[in-house]
């Protein structure tokens, strides 16, 4: 069972389930979860091979969707970012009765060509046995885009001198992570593709595929945000999600 962090109390509104992206954790969404929890119960998860969740030998989207499904008794609103967004999409496509409304944050149901092996290589280069603080670890996290080192360090367990990420399996399964399963089904429920205005993850060329899988899909952008829209524009993301979930 996935490790979860719960916020707020159950109300007459559906619970909201949050699935983070690659190399992330439930804690990445903590600020927003607390705000949304003013209205409903919010459950953020550590995905498999991340955070406090179990490590497995596989990391496919069918696996991740099944992990999410195991947490859902009554239908939930489901929000997933990046990798978590793909997992949420597969959940909606394969077990639609589990999903009330779906929000895919800055991701499309396609195979991308960019690999995420760079951050894995950077983390593997850190001499974990000979660091005593995060600043020393940060100094060894080289060759990354600005801000990525700070993000990755959230998954460093200094006390145990280990990454809370199953780097070997994530590397072995990278083709699956940047890909997307070939599914010939559709989710007819309400779906929002919420993208960063400065991101190229969801492009006009993707819309035919999105509409084939999610016929009720709507699209919105957060101006000035890139792929990490929830970290860059949290209040705007909070408002957009709140407004979408309020639509009857």
Image (spheres, helix red, strand yellow):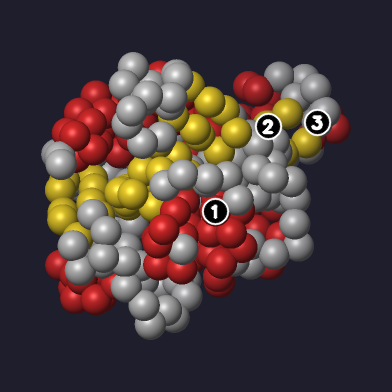
Q: Quadrant of the C terminus?
A: top left
Upstream in sequence: badge 2 or badge 3: 2
**Place of residue 24 in the rendered image (x, y in percent of width and height, measured from the top left):** 54, 40
Upstream in sequence: badge 2 or badge 1: 1
For the residue pair 169 and 217, the one nearer the viewer reads as: 217
Residue 147 visible in the snapshot: yes
Mark 2–mark 1 distance (CA, rounded to whole Å): 28 Å
Mark 2–mark 3 distance (CA, rounded to whole Å): 7 Å
Residue sitting at x 25%, y 55%: 191
User: Which residue position is annotated with label 1?
Assistant: 69
Residue 92 in the figure: left or right of residue 224: right
User: How many C-alpha atoms fall within 10 Å of the one at disc 3: few (<14), some, or many (≥20)?
Assistant: some
**Disc number lying in front (1 or 3):** 1
Q: Are marks 1 and 3 in contact (CB under 8 Å)?
A: no
Q: Is residue 231 above or below residue 57?
A: above
Label 2 sits on a secondary structure element that is strand
Upstream in sequence: badge 1 or badge 3: 1
Label 1 sits on a secondary structure element that is helix
Residue 112 in the figure: left or right of residue 43: left
Residue sitting at x 34%, y 57%: 107
User: Which residue position is annotated with label 2?
Assistant: 156
Residue 85 visible in the snapshot: no
Label 3 sits on a secondary structure element that is loop
Residue sitting at x 24%, y 76%: 212
Q: Is residue 155 above or below residue 117?
A: above
User: Which residue position is annotated with label 3?
Assistant: 161
Residue 208 in the figure: left or right of residue 57: left
Image quadrant where residue 219 sits: bottom left
């Amino acid at each position: 069972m996935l490790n979860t962090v719960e916020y707020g109390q159950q109300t007459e509104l559906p619970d909201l389930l949050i699935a983070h992206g690659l190399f992330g954790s439930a804690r990445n969404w903590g600020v927003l979860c607390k705000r949304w929890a003013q209205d409903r119960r919010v459950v953020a998860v550590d995905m498999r091979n991340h955070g406090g969740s179990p490590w497995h030998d596989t990391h496919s989207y069918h696996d991740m969707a099944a992990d999410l499904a195991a947490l859902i008794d009554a239908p939930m609103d489901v929000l997933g970012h990046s990798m978590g967004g793909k997992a949420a999409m597969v959940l909606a496509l394969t077990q639609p009765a589990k999903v009330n409304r779906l929000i895919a944050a800055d991701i499309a149901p396609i195979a991308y060509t960019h690999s995420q092996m760079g951050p894995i290589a950077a983390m593997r280069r850190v001499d974990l046995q000979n660091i005593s603080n995060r600043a020393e670890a940060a100094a060894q996290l080289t060759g990354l885009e600005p801000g990525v080192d700070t993000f990755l360090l959230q998954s460093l367990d200094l006390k145990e001198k280990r990454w809370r990420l199953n780097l070997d399996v994530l590397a072995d399964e990278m083709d699956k992570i940047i890909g997307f399963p070939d599914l010939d089904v559709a989710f007819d429920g309400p779906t929002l593709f919420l993208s960063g205005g400065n991101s190229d993850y969801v492009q006009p060329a993707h819309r035919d595929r999105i509409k084939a899988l999610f016929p009720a899909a709507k699209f919105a952008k957060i101006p000035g945000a890139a792929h990490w829209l929830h970290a860059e524009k949290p209040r705007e993301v909070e408002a957009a999600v709140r407004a979408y979930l309020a639509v009857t």
